[in-house]
Image: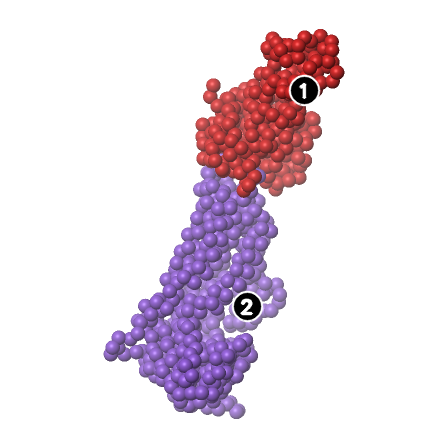
Chain colours: A red, B purple
Amino acid sequence: MTSAISTHDLVKKFRRVTAVNNLNLEVPEGAIYALVGPNGAGKTTAIKVLMNIFPPTSGRAEVLGTDSARLAGRAFTSIGYVSENQELPGWMRIEQFLAYLRPFYPTWDRDLESELVKQLDLPLDRKLGKISRGMRMKAAMLSALAYHPKLIVLDEPFGGLDPLVRDQLIEGMLERASEATIFVSSHDLAEVENLASHVGYLEEGRLRFSEEMAALVERFREVELTFETPPTLQEKWPDSWMQVDASAAVVRFVESRFDRERTSAEIRKVLGNVRDTTFTPMSLRSIFVAMAKSGRSSA
Amino acid sequence: MKNQVLLIFQKDVRQQWREIVLSAAIIVAYAWREVTRSATSEYTVYDFSLLSELLPLLLVVSWIFLILRAVQGESLVGDRQFWVTRPYEWKKLLAAKLLFVFAFVNVPLLFLQVFLLLKAGFPPTRYVVGLLWLQLLWVLILIWPVAILATVTASIGQFMLAVLGVLLYSMIVFPGVFRLVPAAEVSGANSIPASLECLVIAGASLAAVLTQYARRRTARSRVLLLAAAAAFPIIVFAAPYRTLIAYFYPRPRAGQQLPVQIAFDPAKPASHEGGYPEKNKVHVGIPLLVSGVENGWKISVDGIMERVTANEGLEWNSGWHRSGAHFLPNRQHNQVSITMDTDFFEKVKSSPVKVHITFALAPSHARETIRIVVQPGQFTVPGDGRCSFSPIAPDDIFCLFPPTFSDLQVSARSDEITCTPRGKETPLPAGTVGYGSITGVAVGINPVHLETLRLWDWGEFETRDSLLRLCPGTPLSVFTNWEDSTRTRSELDIDGIRLVDYQLNDSPVGWSGFGISVP
């Protein structure tokens, strides 16, 4: 499978601060890729490097087969970029904004535009500078979807929006998913959990992991072990065990390489016979909390 | 895909229509002011109402804001602008901005100037080159600098700060550098360093603008501009001015006739005034006898260097510095004013000293000399100028000039002046020649520039007392079409004078520059 986005040892520094540190990322075509991580992790910077808003300090990135440092002009007819911090021309009414942008895109779809206007419930006669943040995001989203971009890049698109607007945006975006690769950054895991096919976790500028969502959820389990008598605790736990917590005859931990047989065998090997074993699937949020707390990469 | 240049241009027009209308209204008001001013009286009745006087400033400010808002409409600074991830092509964006500035600054200015020329009775088609030259000057002094600063600033506030920085730089660095390296003001010698500075500034500013549009690398562009600003003092400090002066103002070859003969005038000056007050400085006026300047010639003293040697072995050297004086035909008496350190002066002032003065001379001669006669009504002068006596100041002659490149030198002889002496007015000595000058194209909004034709018989000391009164019937010689001749230098040795005898008292007001003057 070819990649819509790929980065190779990408580094972006702002003087002494390294915002993106040796980022190696592959976003397969057709994927809905969620780049997640805490605030300040470097997600926005990484996206801005991908969009050629910032030049990389070193390394390189390719977006739709083009070196990101050369991304300009016509290349953006295939890319729709929406960011929560984007400054739109506030003096323009929404209809003027759309009318202005239309001629820039050979593939602009007037029917789709009308459809999205209705779907997103946009007041065309209002000025961009006079509407709410949610409305502005919807207008930006519309202006980035109406020309059937091959790649949709969304930087924290849902932050601070009310649930209705967020659902409208997600719905609008998912309807385009069949024809585009979607790359979305967010620090809110719950909002990307149900829509992403792939996920990458960025922390302090480093990509901790990047994989398919299903595989990620599949390999993480909360494990609770109950023993007849308190087991002998180890000084060093297996690498894949995170947040090990032992109290009396109960041991809890997060398994980051879950495989029922392999994990069970490893438990027996490390702790001996167990009376009860519970493997509980984890939400994306729980996985990231566990990772953030353990401060280590899993795989 | 519709032409991006037009798309962006149309968008900018929609965004700025109020500013465009306001700018057009100011232009109309300005045109009305200029037309009614010349209609009220023949040439000038100054209307001091605040708004009227502010109109040129308002017009310039409106242009600045049009340029600024057009460029910053697609700001090149920052990382949040929507347009940077849209299919903008930078060359087309740049072209759209140029088109906007051309359409709403250059074209209105041109229309305004054509209108004012027509209203003044000058056919614009005759002055196409002058009009284009004025456009170029406006581009160089306003449009380009504003556009450059607009490309490296994100907001009006940042732009104002940048302008403040440029003004501070101009007020501090320029005078400071010329004070430290006065030889840099010797025009001929400075031609190479000045060309280099222009080249650096033009190259850096062009590179900064292109870098911004093509790559939006603001830090790099700002560094380029700062480097260009830093290059000016570096070039001035590094330039070998002594060598350049020696090259551009060579000593005369053996047997070469100098265009002027300069000698010491042993007569002490009648007036001991003329020194501009300066801390720790004393002014000494050395009287000169100047001869040999042929009719139709003008010898500009581009630079001057004075050296004073006292018997005790003490020596003071001014180094090369600007003079700004001229030697003219029939002006025998001149004076060179030496500005020297008080400490040195106090040590040697009463002792006989040797004074050595070197003049860097730039002769030029008029290829055309035209005799005209002052008329009671309107009369023409070369350069398509139209002159007449002012209805409100009957001694003054005002002339209107279209944008031509004629530099005129005008002279009148005392024995040809037709004015009847008034009251206590003493008749001019026979043979006195009064001189005045009028420069060619002047930077301004109005292409018709107003010049006052005044002739002085005191050379550089342009005081009212030395003004020659002109009356109808007085013939004038107008020298025009100047051609530069070979530059050279002249040396003057004066032995055994006491500086204290020539010390000038400070005259705090009414003094117009230093250099050479007629006592």
Q: Secondary structure at mark 2?
A: helix
Q: CA distance from mark 1 to mark 2?
A: 92 Å
User: In the rendered view, does A229 fall on the left or right side of A16?
Assistant: right
Residue at horizontal 56 percent and vertical 19 percent from the top: A212
* Whether residue B461 is visible: no
Q: Determine the residue located farthest toward the right in the rendered image.
A: A248
For residue A266, what is the image quadrant? top right
Q: Residue B286 or B50: which is nearer the viewer?
A: B286
* Whether residue A279 is visible: yes
Q: Determine whether B289 is above or below A103 in the image.
A: below
Circles 1 and 2 in contact, beta carbons < 8 Å: no
User: In the rendered view, does A33 fall on the left or right side of B256?
Assistant: right
Image mark 1: chain: A
Residue at horizontal 60 percent and vertical 25 percent from the top: A296
Circle 2 crowding by C-alpha within 10 Å: few under 14, some 14–19, many from 20:
some
Give amino acid for label 1. Val
Q: Determine whether B365 is above or below B146 in the image.
A: below
Image mark 2: chain: B
> Where residue B37 is drawn, which disc sits there?
2
Q: Residue A110 placed where, x, y %?
A: 55, 28
Q: Determine whether B120 is above or below B225 in the image.
A: below
Query: Mark 1 — residue?
Result: A244
Q: In the rendered view of the protein, which quadrant contains the C terminus of chain A?
A: top right
Q: Nearer the viewer, mark 1 or mark 2?
A: 1
Give amino acid for label 2. Arg
Q: Residue A238 placed where, x, y %?
A: 61, 18
Circle 1 crowding by C-alpha within 10 Å: few under 14, some 14–19, many from 20:
some
Q: Residue B174 placed where, x, y %?
A: 49, 64
The total of numbered circles placed on residues is 2
> Where residue B397 is drawn, which disc sits there?
none
Residue at horizontal 45 percent and vertical 79 percent from the top: B338
